[in-house]
């Protein structure tokens, strides 16, 4: 929904053309708390079920984001956004029944996007920018090999750590074809990361290795619509496509010999996000909003893993904005994300994510929901509140 602009410049993340709505200088600082709960229950027919279920694998996280925009002249505006677009962390019990597939996982990114916008006329504005992104991945799982500490239970952990900085671009436009109507389209390019790091083994018979691997994180197209119905009500709608199908299997290679050390199977499909919502101006100072969204996950019954047992899910959101003065506005929001049914995990002998020598079928079910609480402060300096743009004949 933010791709269509509105009163906040945080939409620059989806559509850089939102930068053009700034009158003088505008900034925003966002703080978001993510509180997931996810549990994996192993089917009794799986031999490793004797070691127990995962417990709650969800890891709470606090994310910080910032947006700044400045108008240079009547036509040109510049901006900078700082975000964490890709990230997850899961941490099951160490000696659980799925430990040979996952003990802990963490993926983290930090993205900076400087942007330049141009106002073509009263109804069309465009923008483009550069993405500079740091990406870090850390994976850990039980290692079954030879020697002490290489059998279950009590096996040591093999761990992989790697990171990189990659570059991409972003572009978009905003049109206002009629009074009260605003449509925005944004594009964030794919970013290729040439990861380098280390692979550690817990037993002397398997030496640690310097590793490398290429991961391309997907491009995204976002479409947002704002339709003002009257002085109090505004309708919002959004559509987003993410090309996760480009993330298939990552070959982790030795930096010395060049051979493949291991493979990380993803085999994702494309993701879609559909959202509708509304805003209600209760008073000149207080605006209320709510919305519902449905997300088609890139993860399904064929590629779901113990590291990220994701599935198609619903979002229910509500929030409010309080305009303290012409310069300062405070925002508060809440989202509840849930998967209606349990998600199946199945790993059979010969599958890409089966452990070497696996002779049985691993079957489990996951149940996940997430609470998200966010707060933001918006501030403006150097100008009065902008007037509405109206299409001229």
Image (cartoon, rainbow, N blue to C red):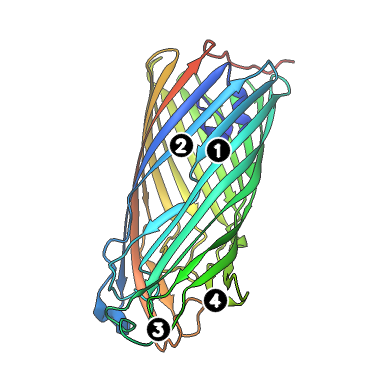
Comes first in the chain, label 3 or label 1: 1
| Residue, disc 3 | 361
Compared to residue 387, the image places residue 211 above or below, namely below
Distance in Å between CA atoms under marks 4 and 3: 24 Å
Compared to residue 78, the image places residue 325 above or below, namely above
Mark toward the viewer: 4 or 1: 4
Mark 1 and mark 2 in contact? Answer it, CB < 8 Å: yes
Q: Percent x, y for residue 371?
A: 33, 46
Residue 344 shown left or right of residue 389 in the figure = left
Comes first in the chain, label 1 or label 2: 1
| Residue, disc 2 | 65
Distance in Å between CA atoms under marks 1 and 2: 10 Å
Residue 151 shown left or right of residue 236 in the figure = left
Residue 135 appears in view: yes
Write the residue at 57% across / 16% down.
24
Mark toward the viewer: 3 or 1: 1
Label 1 residue SS = helix
Comes first in the chain, label 2 or label 4: 2
Comes first in the chain, label 4 or label 3: 4
Q: Residues within 10 Å of mark 4 (few under 14, many from 20)?
A: some
Write the residue at 51% across / 33% down.
236
| Residue, disc 4 | 261
Q: Which mark is residue 13?
A: 1
Label 4 residue SS = strand
Relative to the observer, which residue lies in front, 353 or 72?
Answer: 72
Write the residue at 73% across / 23% down.
120
Q: Percent x, y for residue 155?
A: 31, 78
Q: Percent x, y for residue 358?
A: 42, 86
Q: Residues within 10 Å of mark 3 (few under 14, many from 20)?
A: some
Label 3 residue SS = loop
């Amino acid at each position: 929904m933010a791709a269509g602009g509105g009163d906040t410049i945080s939409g620059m993340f989806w559509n850089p053309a939102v930068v053009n709505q700034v009158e003088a200088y505008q900034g925003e600082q966002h703080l978001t708390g993510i509180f997931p709960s996810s549990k994996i229950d192993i089917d009794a027919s799986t031999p490793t079920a004797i070691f127990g279920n995962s417990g709650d694998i969800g890891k709470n996280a606090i994310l910080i984001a910032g947006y700044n925009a400045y108008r240079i002249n009547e036509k040109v505006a510049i901006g900078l956004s700082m975000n964490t677009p890709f990230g997850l962390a899961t941490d099951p019990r160490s000696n659980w029944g799925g430990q040979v597939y996952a003990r802990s996982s963490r993926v983290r990114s930090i993205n900076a996007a400087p942007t330049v916008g141009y106002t073509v006329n009263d109804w069309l504005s465009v923008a483009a920018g550069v993405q500079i992104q740091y990406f870090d991945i850390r994976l850990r799982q039980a290692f079954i090999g030879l020697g002490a500490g290489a059998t279950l239970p009590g096996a040591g952990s093999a761990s992989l750590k790697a990171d990189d900085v990659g570059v991409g671009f972003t572009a978009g436009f905003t049109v206002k074809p009629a009074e009260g109507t605003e449509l925005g389209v944004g594009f964030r390019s794919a970013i290729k990361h040439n990861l380098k790091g280390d692979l550690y083994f817990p037993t002397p018979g398997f030496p640690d290795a310097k590793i490398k691997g290429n991961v391309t994180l997907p491009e995204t197209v976002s479409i947002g619509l704002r339709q003002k119905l009257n002085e109090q009500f505004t309708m919002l709608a959004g559509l987003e496509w993410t090309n996760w199908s480009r993330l298939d299997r990552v070959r982790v290679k030795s930096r010395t010999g060049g051979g493949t050390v291991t493979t990380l199977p993803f085999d994702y499909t494309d993701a879609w996000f559909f959202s509708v919502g509304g805003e209600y101006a209760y008073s000149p100072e207080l605006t209320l909003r709510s919305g519902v969204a449905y997300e088609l996950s890139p993860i399904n019954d064929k590629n779901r893993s113990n590291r990220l047992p994701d599935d198609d899910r619903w979002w229910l959101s509500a929030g409010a904005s309080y305009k303290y003065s012409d310069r300062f506005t405070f925002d508060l929001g809440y989202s509840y994300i849930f998967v209606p049914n349990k998600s199946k995990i199945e790993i059979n002998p010969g599958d890409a994510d089966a452990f070497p020598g696996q002779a049985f079928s691993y079957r489990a079910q996951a149940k996940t929901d997430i609470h998200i609480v966010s707060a933001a402060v918006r501030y403006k300096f150097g100008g009065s509140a902008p007037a509405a743009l109206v299409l001229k004949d």
